[in-house]
Amino acid sequence: MKKTFFILSTLALLAACNQEARQAPKPAPASVQATLVPQTPPTDKWVGKWVGVEGLHLTIAKDDSIGRGHYLLTMQYGLDADDSGTFKGEAAEDGIAFNRPDGPQLLRAGDGAATGLKWLADKKDCLVVVTGEGYCRD
């Protein structure tokens, strides 16, 4: 009985040693990840100054220190002095995703009607955060 147990244990040990070690997949190198963002993201066309209503405004600048598809959004997004700041944004499928004190936001292209603001209704080139908050170019 001991002999049988010893032989089975030895066979099990040899079988385990014969298995190749499996490694976790490595993430793609930075050079490959960089190719996932287009050379010129469509959101690069949004760089510059945008105007809202009642003194609201948005300025988009590239954040080249991080890489393609990254932006700095300087905005006055509400009527209170505290409703302003500079936020880091990143190109997303539908626009520029960013976070500010009122939560995660998505800046997307639209027209004046999409802003929901009658003062911007006739504009054609606008960016909208939510209905009631939009910025347009003339």
Image: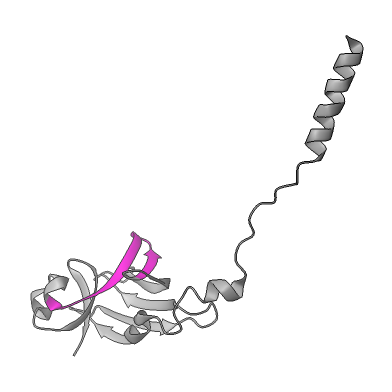
**Quarter of the image where the N terminus is located:** top right
Res. 29 image quadrant: bottom right
- Check the image and tell me how it is coloured: one colour
Q: Residue at x 38, y 84 (%)?
A: 44
Please state if 12 lies on the left or on the right of 53 as rendered: right
Which contiguous range is marked in magenta?
A: 96-112
Q: Position of residue 5 (x, y in %)?
A: 86, 16
**Quarter of the image where the C terminus is located:** bottom left
| Magenta span: chief secondary structure | strand
Q: Residue at x 79, y 34 (%)?
A: 15
Q: Position of residue 25 (x, y in %)?
A: 63, 56
Foreground: 23 or 33?
23
Q: Residue at x 75, y 46 (%)?
A: 20
Q: Position of residue 74 (x, y in %)?
A: 37, 78
Does the magenta-highlighted stretch encompass residue 62? no
Foreground: 19 or 120?
19
Please state if 77 lies on the left or on the right of 13 as rendered: left
Q: Residue at x 48, y 73 (%)?
A: 36
Q: Residue furthest top?
A: 1
